[in-house]
Image (cartoon, rainbow, N blue to C red):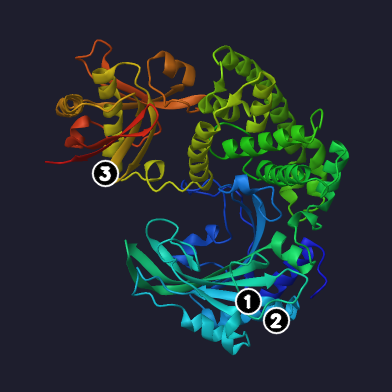
């Protein structure tokens, strides 16, 4: 294999190869997507190219290539193993309606075997094996045939079935409910020291994926409905960190030259050695990964700061998680800003990081200082919990310490053990699973409706949710609080605290209450005010939600109410202007979803 020790050497080799194939180089786009409310961060090289993949002509032509900085946090809990990262660089090349499978697979084979000089006997590939639920899309014999013609043994070509409806297993997309999608072919490298087996087993983790070629040849137009695309595109992705690890015969990305200076510095400040104890090694990986991601977010041209909202929330979570693992390593004093120099020296080509170095270090220092204060408050909260605990700490309380004060569950268990009691881990894990699912949604920004959907149907259901919230308080009691909601153009889903199943009479009363307010033709007014003023005015807030300093509130006016309004909630919308636009409200289902939490599903329609 070619001797490539440095990330810049790998990037240079990749870009040079594709420029020789008449591709034009694109600069890396910002980590913060422009004019796209559906995602928080740029998650792949194709993200900034979506309009051109959909047919808009690119000013540089039909062939482009680049290395793109990316952030993905949906698997943040996996960081700590040898391969997962939140920040990474993605090498990619695109055909925007130009070449297709034959040329792209040929490019891939030549770059791997001729430029990088990877031995053919250490390579294997997967191709789309079809999906029985979507019989109109055949398995990708074309891609398999191309690989075979290039000399890939048939035993090293695996068909993977079942992906067209799952966005996995050799199928990409669409990004939303509909849109461009298609099969892909993935390339794998045998990382073990012994010779690779003759027959390729994709489930054997000694085969590591290093490249993915996506062939966008279909347009999903509905559930199970696909049409051939007029403009067929190629979208590829090769992770810099993983490929550099493979080229250097390593089985740990954190041992490459990308991470080596940072790991050495963490060893110095912690006085621990990498690779000796599993827990210490895991902690060092998490600190290295999260700090690098934080440096890139802080150093981005769009100047994100830690906060409780959007990208700032993800940034805060990364910094605080790194600080927690610093404590596990026994690091005393603030240390995050001390590590930034080691990150910057690896990335001389990202000038924005160097221009914003002062801002990066100041924000890291401030966030670490704030977190230490939060930890002190968390200890006080733990003492309060102990006053009400006799035998076991409720899982919800333990999760509160994790979510609000940054206490790892291990810390809570140790503190509890000192008092001779235990933590309800079953309930904690249930709460953590709900948090994890929500975090993945927030981190990817994959809102299929709600804030990213301002259709008339969604506006009507969003407003109906406000009416439902207040109607439940009127019928069941003023202590009812929203526990969550989900809205799509077909229905609303609303979770609230209540200890039992609602009676048919109660459900009828809620429905009638809402329909009476719809018939009353009440105006819906939006205004922006400070969060403190909003809460003082009586505006409802979702239980456990964190809000910015300035919030928007929606008031459903009602002169028949002594307050002058029926409902007032902190919300970003969208909503109708008058309740008369809702038509008629109907509850479809009422059920329990957790201890003390009920769920209502409902619809509105025009009679």
- Viewer-nearest residue: 456 or 426: 426
Q: Position of residue 508 (x, y in %)?
A: 16, 28
Q: Residues within 10 Å of mark 3 (few under 14, many from 20)?
A: many
Q: Is residue 43 left or right of residue 89?
A: left
Quadrant of the rendered structure where residue 422 is?
A: top right
Position of residue 122 measured from the top left corner of the image (x, y, whole percent):
70, 77
Callout in the foreground (3, 2): 2
**Residue situated in front as seen by the camera: 142 or 15:** 142
Give the Cα separation between the discs numbered 1 and 2: 8 Å
Q: In the figure, residue 594 lies in which quadrant?
A: top left
**Rendering coords of residue 375 (x, y %):** 67, 23
Q: Which residue is mark 1?
A: 124
Q: Does 390 sit above or below residue 157?
A: above
Tell me the SS state at disc 2: helix
The quadrant of the rendering that contains the N terminus is bottom right
> Which quadrant does the C terminus fall into?
top left
Which SS class for mark 1? Answer: strand
Nearest-to-viewer mark from 3 and 1? 1
Task: Quote the CA–CA distance across marks 3 and 1.
Answer: 48 Å
Tell me which label, 3 or 1, sits earlier in the chain. Answer: 1
Q: Residues within 10 Å of mark 1 (few under 14, many from 20)?
A: many
Q: Residue 120: which numbered mark, if any?
A: 2
| Residue depicted at 80% across the width and 45% down the height | 277
Q: Tell me whether the residue at label 3 lies in contact with that at label 1, contact meaning CB atoms closer than 8 angstroms.
A: no
SS type, badge 3: helix
In three-dimensional space, the C-alpha distance between marks 3 and 2, rounded to whole angstroms, equals 55 Å
Q: Nearer the viewer, residue 180 or 435?
A: 435
Indicate whether 262 appears above or below 108. above
Q: How many marks?
A: 3
Disc 1, disc 2: CB below 8 Å?
A: no
Which residue is at 68% across, 46% downward? 293
| Location of mark 3 (residue) | 457
């Amino acid at each position: 294999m070619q001797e490539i020790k440095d990330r810049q050497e790998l990037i240079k080799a990749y870009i040079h190869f594709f420029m020789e194939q008449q591709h034009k180089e694109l600069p890396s786009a910002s980590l913060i997507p422009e004019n796209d409310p559906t995602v928080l961060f740029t998650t792949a090289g194709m993200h900034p190219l979506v309009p051109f993949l959909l047919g808009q002509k690119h000013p540089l032509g039909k062939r482009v290539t680049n290395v793109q900085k990316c952030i993905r946090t949906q698997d943040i809990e996996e960081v700590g193993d040898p391969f997962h990262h939140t920040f990474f660089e993605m090498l990619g090349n695109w055909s925007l309606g130009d070449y297709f499978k034959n040329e792209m697979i040929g490019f891939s084979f030549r770059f791997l075997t001729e430029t990088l000089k990877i031995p053919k006997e250490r390579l294997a590939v997967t191709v789309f094996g079809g999906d029985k639920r979507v019989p109109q899309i055949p398995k990708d014999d074309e891609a398999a045939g191309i690989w075979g013609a290039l000399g890939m043994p048939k035993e090293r070509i695996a068909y993977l079935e079942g992906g067209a409806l799952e966005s996995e297993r050799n199928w990409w997309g669409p990004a939303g409910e509909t849109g461009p999608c298609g099969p892909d072919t993935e390339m794998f490298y045998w990382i073990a020291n012994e010779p690779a087996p003759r027959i390729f087993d994709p489930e054997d983790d000694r085969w590591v994926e290093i490249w993915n070629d996506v062939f966008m040849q279909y347009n999903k137009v509905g559930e199970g409905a696909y049409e051939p695309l007029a403009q067929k595109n190629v979208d590829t992705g090769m992770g810099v960190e993983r490929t550099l690890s493979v080229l250097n015969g390593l089985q740990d990305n954190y041992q490459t030259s990308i991470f080596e200076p940072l790991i050495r510095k963490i060893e110095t400040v912690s006085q621990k050695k990498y690779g000796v104890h599993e827990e210490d090694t895991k902690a060092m990986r998490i600190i290295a990964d999260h700090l690098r991601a934080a440096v890139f977010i802080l150093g981005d041209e769009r100047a994100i700061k830690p906060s409780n909202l959007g990208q700032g929330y993800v940034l805060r979570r990364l910094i605080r998680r790194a600080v927690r693992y610093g404590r596990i390593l026994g690091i005393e004093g603030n240390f995050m800003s001390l590590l930034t120099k080691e990150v910057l020296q690896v990335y001389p080509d990202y000038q924005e990081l160097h221009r914003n170095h002062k801002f990066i270090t100041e924000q890291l220092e401030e966030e670490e200082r704030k977190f230490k204060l939060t930890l002190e408050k968390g200890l006080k909260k733990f003492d309060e919990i102990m006053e009400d605990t006799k035998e076991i700490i409720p899982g919800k309380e333990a999760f509160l310490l994790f979510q609000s004060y940054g206490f790892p569950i291990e810390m809570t268990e140790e503190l509890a053990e000192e008092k001779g009691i235990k933590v309800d881990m079953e309930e904690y894990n249930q709460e953590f699973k709900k948090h994890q699912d929500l975090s993945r949604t927030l981190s990817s920004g994959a809102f299929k409706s709600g804030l990213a959907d301002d259709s008339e149907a969604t506006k009507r259901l969003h407003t109906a949710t406000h009416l439902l919230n207040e109607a439940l308080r009127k019928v069941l009691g003023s202590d009812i609080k929203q526990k969550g909601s989900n809205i799509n153009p077909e229905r609303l889903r609303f979770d609230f605290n209540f200890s039992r199943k609602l009676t048919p009479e109660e459900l009828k009363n809620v429905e009638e209450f809402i329909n009476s307010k719809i018939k009353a033709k009440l105006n819906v007014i939006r205004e922006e005010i400070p969060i403190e003023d909003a809460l003082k005015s009586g505006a409802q807030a979702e239980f456990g939600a964190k809000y910015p300093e300035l919030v928007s509130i929606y008031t459903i006016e009602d002169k028949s109410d002594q307050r002058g309004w029926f409902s007032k909630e902190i919300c970003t919308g969208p909503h109708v202007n008058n309740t008369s636009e809702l038509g008629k409200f109907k509850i479809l289902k009422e059920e329990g979803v957790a201890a003390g939490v009920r769920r209502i599903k409902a619809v509105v329609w025009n009679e």
